[in-house]
Image: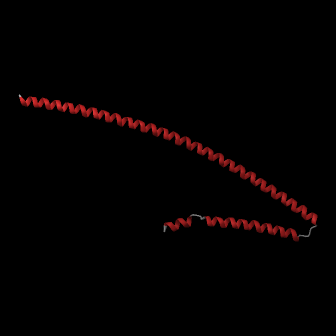
Amino acid sequence: MSDEKNRAEQPSAHNHEHKHHFGLGVLTGATVGAVIALLYTPRTGAQMRHEIGDQWTRAKGKCSTGYVKAKDKAGHWTERGHHAYDVARTKVTHGARETRQYVREVSDAVTRKAHHKDHQDHKDYKDARTAANVDFAMVQR
């Protein structure tokens, strides 16, 4: 049940393709409608060429403006992405350095404790042998 719910909630690539086809259809329909309207409007050839030229110039201007805006926006997001990457890289590098230092400190502490315990065990062993020897000597007398 949860798999079906997840699939229903996630937009599929198929849905996005239909949106692109729909948008392309709208643009194509608008263009065809504009051309038919221009062809059936009672104007002279010179007026028609002038109007088509004006519309073409406006369309080029809008495309150019849209391109510049999109380029600026992409540049802005690229800069933000680079900044986020740099911040993350710095934090990860710093964290790795601190982790290495912490591991070294813990390792050194464990090593010192092990050496201290070995030394203490050896001392306890010597003390026990000495006590056993003293006890044995007392028993012999």
Residue sitting nearer the eye, 44 or 113: 113
| Residue 32 position (above or below residue 83) | below
| Residue 123 position (above or below residue 91) | above
Residue 78 on image: x %, y %: 65, 48
Tell me the residue at 53%/41% (across/down): 91
User: In the picture, which quadrant includes the C terminus?
Assistant: top left
Tell me the residue at 71%/49% (across/down): 72
Q: How many marks?
A: 0
| Residue 134 position (above or below residue 25) | above
Q: Toward which corner of the image does residue 28 lie, by quadrant?
A: bottom right
Tell me the residue at 42%/36% (across/down): 104
Residue sitting nearer the eye, 77 or 135: 135
Residue 12 on image: x %, y %: 59, 65
Coloring basis for residues = secondary structure
Residue 114 appears left or right of 43 = left
Residue 129 appears left or right of 75 = left
